[in-house]
Amino acid sequence: MPQVQLTEEEYDKLMERIYQILNRTEELDHVTHHWMWEVWRTLHYNRL
């Protein structure tokens, strides 16, 4: 997986956008929802 360098502001915006997408779960199919959570989790825990 490529390494992406984000500024703190870029990272916060990205995480917020992903979270907004996840909050619309009724609009997402199961696979997409699961994938988006994986992306969020990966970004979140790699940042810690």
Image (tube, grey):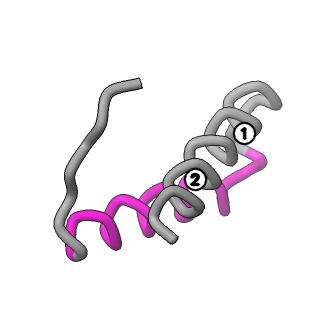
The disc placed on residue 1 is none
Question: Is the residue 41 above or below the residue 31 in the image?
Answer: below
Question: Is the residue 6 above or below the residue 13 in the image?
Answer: above
Residue at the image position 21 percent from the left and 58 percent from the top: 6
Quarter of the image for the N terminus: give it. Answer: top left
**Residue denoted by label 2:** 40
Residue 18 in the image: state x and y as whole percent.
50, 55
Give the CA distance from mark 1 to mark 2: 11 Å
Q: Judge the density around disc 2: few (<14), some (14-19), many (≥20) Cα neighbours within 10 Å.
A: some
Residue 10 in the image: state x and y as whole percent.
22, 65
Mark 1 and mark 2 residues within 8 Å of each other at the beta carbon = no
Q: Judge the density around disc 1: few (<14), some (14-19), many (≥20) Cα neighbours within 10 Å.
A: some
Residue 11 in the image: state x and y as whole percent.
31, 65
* Helix, strand or loop under label 2: helix
Residue at the image position 67 percent from the left and 33 percent from the top: 35
In the image, taking residue 37 as reference, residue 48 lies left or right, namely left
Instruction: Determine which quarter of the picture holds residue 36.
Output: top right
In the image, taking residue 21 as reference, residue 32 lies left or right, namely right
Instruction: Determine which quarter of the picture holds residue 3.
Output: top left
Residue mark closest to the camera, 1 vs 2: 2
Residue 33 in the image: state x and y as whole percent.
72, 39
Q: Is residue 34 magenta?
A: no
**Residue denoted by label 1:** 33
Q: Does the magenta stretch include residue 15?
A: yes
Residue at the image position 17 percent from the left and 67 percent from the top: 7
Residue at the image position 34 percent from the left and 72 percent from the top: 12
> Mark 2 belongs to which amino acid?
Trp
As rendered, which of 3 and 24 lies closer to the eye?
3
Specify the segment rendered in magenta: 9-26
Label the magenta part by its dominant secondary structure: helix
* Helix, strand or loop under label 1: helix
